[in-house]
Every structure is written in C-alpha cells, then in structure tokens.
Amino acid sequence: PSDPARADRVDDEEREVLCAAVSDASAPPRHVPGINSGQIGPELAKLRSAQGEHAEYYTLEHYDRLYGRRRAWARDGRGSKVWCKDVHGPGCRECTSCHFCRQKTADVKTRCQCGEWRSTPPGGRGRGAWCGWCLEMRMGENIEEALADEEWRCPVCRDICNCSGANCLRAKRNLFPTQQLTHEALQFGWQSVAHYLITTRIRENAE
C-alpha cells in the first residue's frame, strides 16, 4: 500500500530540487566561453534595458537544465495544430491545453510528474503539458524525445519556463514578458528562446 507521508516527502524533495528559484546575486554577467558568447538582438536588448530593478539573470545550473534535443522535431513541416473545437463538441475532456500557448488542441502533449503530486503545484497540474510546436520553439526540445524519457521534467519544474502566464515564473518575479522573441533567437543562431535568454545572461556568483 502507498504511504501518504512518504508521498508528501517525495513532493517536497522534488520541489526543492527541481523548482529552486534563481539565487540572488549582484555580480556582473559572466562570460562563459562557448556558452554566452552569442549576440543579442535589438528586441531582447530593448526588453532588458527596460527591466530596471527586476533584471533577470540565470545560473550555470539553469544552463544545465536546458535539455536540448538529439534531432529537430521540425515543427514548420507539420502543418497546423488540430483545434479541439473543430473535432469535438463542447465539454470535451479528451483534449488538453498547452501550458505555453494555452490553446486546447487534439495533438499530443508532454507529461510531467508534477501533475501527479499530492498537492497542486504552483502554476497548476497542467503546467507539464506542452505541445510539440511550443516545446521546440520556446525550449529547443523534441516532444517525441520528451515523451520517450520517463525522467523528463517540464520547463516550470526546471525553473526555465519563459511563458507569460500570470501564475507562472516570470510574472511572479516581475520579469518582462518575452513577447515574440522566437524569430530573433533563430536569427541570431540560438536553438530556442530559452537558450537565447539563459545563455546570454549567466551570472558568476549564482551557482
């Protein structure tokens, strides 16, 4: 039989390990050869200049939480998403919404263990559901690889989500919404928006 007390301990351990927030640090951004040596485009530069006291930064641990991918999912060649409203009637419980785009579609989504925690995690149980388009575009990951990996954790658990949700990481920390950074990230050679944000803003004393 399951032990509720043990389940609570596991939840607490996962929150502590996977959901650690960015540490407070006043050191200048660190130049890491081969990591944050890329260029920043005008849109991201404008967003960051307007941050003021709420300037974002990341740690090398955050960089390590960028899973990446072994091969591209190639979202551009997959056509449009299948909207739930186009294939099912009102009240459908089969389709799910993507955490990032918040669109209810019939296409497959990722799954994360945080959805099964005894207590509802910050951001809701659906925070681990990502569609393939958003997962690749915003996080640089292949949904097929994520689904095949039993140890996969969602971007929120890894503290690297860049969505604009009011109950998610950036909004709670008063950080700027990332707007339409996808095109600029790709233009400047970054694998995704997450890679663009994190690898260009690593701080030395925030391990």
Image (cartoon, rainbow, N blue to C red):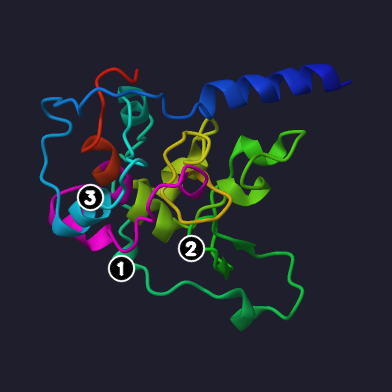
Task: Calculate the distance from the C-alpha at mark 1 to the C-alpha at mark 2.
Answer: 19 Å
Counting the numbered discs, the total is 3
Tag of residue 101: 2
In the picture, which quadrant includes the N terminus? top right
Mark 2 touches mark 3? (CB < 8 Å): no
The x, y position of residue 16, in whole percent, is 58, 21
Report the side of 152 relative to 23 (left or right): right
Q: Quadrant of residue 113?
A: top right
Report the side of 81 relative to 76 (left or right): right
Nearest to N terminus: mark 1 or mark 2: 1
Q: Which residue is mark 1?
A: 77
SS assignment at label 2: loop
In the picture, which quadrant includes the C terminus? top left
The residues colored magenta run: 170-195
Tag of residue 49: 3
Which residue sits at x=37%, y=42%? 54
Q: Is residue 16 in the magenta section?
A: no
Residue found at the very far right of the displayed protein? 1
The answer, for residue 3, to whether it is visible in the render is no
The answer, for residue 101, to whether it is visible in the render is yes
Q: Nearer the viewer, mark 3 or mark 1?
A: 3
Nearest to N terminus: mark 3 or mark 1: 3
Mark 3 touches mark 1? (CB < 8 Å): no
Amino acid of disc 2: Cys
Nearest to N terminus: mark 2 or mark 3: 3
The x, y position of residue 43, in whole percent, is 20, 59
Task: Calculate the distance from the C-alpha at mark 3 to the C-alpha at mark 1.
Answer: 35 Å
Amino acid of disc 1: Gly
Q: Nearer the viewer, mark 2 or mark 3?
A: 3
Q: Quadrant of residue 6?
A: top right
Which residue sits at x=33%, y=31%? 58
23, 189: nearer the viewer: 23
